[in-house]
Image (cartoon, rainbow, N blue to C red):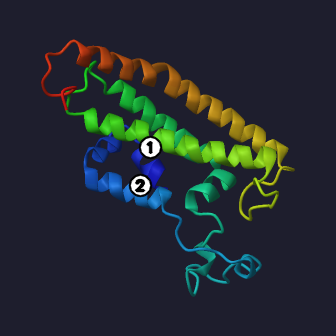
């Protein structure tokens, strides 16, 4: 929901604000309330809103849960924000959008790492051979193919336009006098 909100071309600029970056990071990457195996067998609430928030818990955290249940929604929003970051580039890192662009690249790379973990787990299982409740079991071939396709799209975006932009920044920075950007 939050990624969809910020994926809007106009709203994404709100993420220039470090406090909003922290809020989005907390919502995405903090695991949230843990769901026990017993709670996982409980029926859904009879009414909405539920009597308590127990039905909102997950066994592996919110981002893993979203990547398992609706990966396209998450990745489309991240890809949209990454494209906006590249569009806002002026060719050097000393613009008003520098912090926003770097945040969006970091966000995309962090989501990529979650996606990679999920794919590796679906391919090989956990290192100890145990199944992790809430992650994809190796039998989910269709979902694994979807995740691999989404990963390929995200990597293509990161390794083409985004990388080109960052390399342009490095080139610009190396041509500057030894003050400011690269001197620190």
How far apart marks 1 and 2 lie (CA) works out to 8 Å
Residue behind mark 1: 107
179 on left or right of 115: left
Marks 1 and 2, the one that precedes in the sequence: 2
Name above or below for residue 129 compared with residue 76. Answer: below
Q: Residue at x 39, y 31 (%)?
A: 84
Q: Secondary structure beneath disc 1?
A: helix
Name above or below for residue 91 compared with residue 157. Answer: above
154 on left or right of 36: left
Q: Secondary structure beneath disc 2?
A: helix
Residue 123 in which image quadrant? top right
Q: Residue at x 25, y 15 (%)?
A: 174
Q: Residue at x 48, y 39 (%)?
A: 108
Label 2 crowd (10 A; few <14 / some 14-19 / many >=20)? few
Rendered image: mark on residue 25: 2
The reply to whether the C-beta atoms of the residues labelled 1 and 2 are less than 8 Å apart is: yes
Residue 86: horizontal and vertical position, in percent?
38, 26
Residue 20: horizontal and vertical position, in percent?
31, 54
Query: Residue furthest toward the right?
Result: 139
Residue 165 in which image quadrant? top left
Residue 81: horizontal and vertical position, in percent?
43, 37
63 on left or right of 131: left
């Amino acid at each position: 929901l939050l990624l969809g909100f910020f994926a809007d071309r106009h709203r994404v600029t709100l993420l220039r604000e470090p406090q909003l970056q922290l809020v989005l990071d907390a919502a995405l990457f903090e695991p949230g309330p843990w769901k026990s195996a017993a709670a996982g067998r409980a029926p859904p609430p009879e009414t909405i809103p539920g009597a308590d928030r127990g039905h909102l818990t997950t066994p592996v955290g919110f981002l893993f849960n979203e990547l398992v249940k609706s990966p396209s929604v998450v990745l489309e929003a991240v890809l949209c924000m990454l494209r906006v970051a590249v569009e806002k580039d002026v060719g050097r890192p000393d613009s008003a959008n520098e912090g926003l662009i770097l945040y969006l690249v970091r966000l995309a790379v962090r989501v990529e790492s979650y996606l990679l973990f999920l794919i590796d787990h679906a391919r090989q299982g956990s290192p100890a051979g145990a199944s992790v409740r809430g992650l994809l079991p190796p039998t989910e071939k269709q979902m694994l193919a979807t995740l691999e396709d989404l990963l390929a799209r995200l990597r293509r975006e990161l390794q083409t336009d985004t990388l080109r932009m960052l390399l342009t920044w490095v080139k610009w920075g190396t041509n500057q006098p030894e003050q400011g950007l690269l001197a620190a």
